Amino acid sequence: MAAPAAKFGVLDMIRSIARFVPAALLLAAASLASAADIGQIKTSKGDVSVERGGATLPGTVGTRLETADVLRTGPNGSAGVTMSDNSLLSIGPNSVLALDAYRFDATTHQGQFDATLSKGSLAVVSGKIAKQSPDAMKVRTPASVLGVRGTEFVVEVGG
Amino acid sequence: MVAFAALAAGCAPRTTVILLPEPDGKKTAVSVSDSRGEVVLDQPYAAVERSAFRTKPYTATPEEVRSKFGATLAAQPRREEKFTLHFAEGKDELTDESRALLDRIFAEIAARPVPDVLVIGHTDRTGSDPVNDALARQRADTVRNELLKRGLAPANVQASGRGSREPLVPTAAGVAEPRNRRVEIIVR
């Protein structure tokens, strides 16, 4: 949670680079900056893992999450995540949840959050992104797309 | 047989969505769209089940939620908590009432396995901006130090000051307002 200091650093850097770098590169830099540390695993029980860029990491309590991470639980597993916009997501046993896209501006509360539950169960308490802009948060399942206007719901795929 | 049916319908497994009641009764809604159209859930326990063959809106029960989602809901992280502490005028000294709350607040923070704590200092609208910005930051640092003394890990507590920009009680410039001389502690 070194967010405020880190953000100033990044903005200052972008401003100073802006004088001589095309806008497209800047956008790439900005999206890289926002890719790190979008949430944290706060609860973890049984078999929980995080897939990141081809590697599989243990999904222990305290693990910081990044865009494109995929959380997986085994038959006895469950996990809970708090995102930086204060959304709470938890998954039950035999679940696969991908954090496909995430952007959050802590000042304006604008952003975007796309997640996919490809199997298992998910409980959501939506946060500041959905509160600021209804439908800016979406949860996909293999057959449906959920537009989140707020606030608490559960989703099951299969079963 | 099941595999065949799913295959025939395009391989999509069943999706069930249930809207839960809000603790404070606020308005809430989720839209569920698929190739057959959109269903909007906007009442507590409004639900929809989308199978290979049909999209069926229905009303779920607390029992169904408990039996299907018990383990999932039990894994939910604790919700954000906020605490407010008050200060003496023009100083970074806690009021006696607020000082007495520190141990209880620390206990609530320490009950979380991986707490993220934001400590945000504020002033009332007496004094200049530079003075208030410095004072707000000092107040936040004072509270942060009190939490560190009690054993919170430094990496988990961020302090910042907002000066007089976010008064709890709106006032004209120059008005001394005890409720605005505060530090907010946000715990996730």
Image (cartoon, coloured by chain):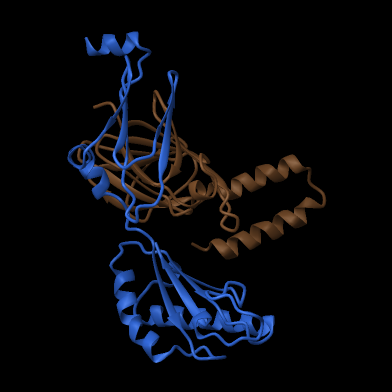
Chain colours: A brown, B blue
Q: Residue farthest to the right?
A: A20
Left or right relative to B65: residue A26: right
Q: Is residue B16 visible?
A: no
Q: Quadrant of the N terminus of chain B?
A: top left
In this picture, is B2 found above or below A21?
above
In this picture, is B93 found above or below B102?
below
Q: Quadrant of the C terminus of chain B?
A: bottom left
Instruction: Count the labels in the image.
Output: 0
Left or right relative to A105: residue B155: left
Q: In x, y percent, where is residue B138?
A: 55, 83
Residue at image point 61% right, 77% down: B164
Say which of B81 and B173 sits in front: B173
Q: Quadrant of residue B65?
A: top left
Left or right relative to A115: residue B167: right
Residue at image point 52% right, 83% down: B181
In this picture, is A89 found above or below B3?
below
Say which of A61 and B30 sits in front: B30
In this picture, is A126 found above or below A101?
below
Q: In x, y percent, where is residue B54?
A: 33, 17
Residue at image point 34% right, 56% down: B24
Say which of B10 and B45 sits in front: B45
Q: In x, y percent, where is residue A106?
A: 56, 57
Q: Is residue B81 visible?
A: yes
Q: In x, y percent, where is residue A141?
A: 39, 29
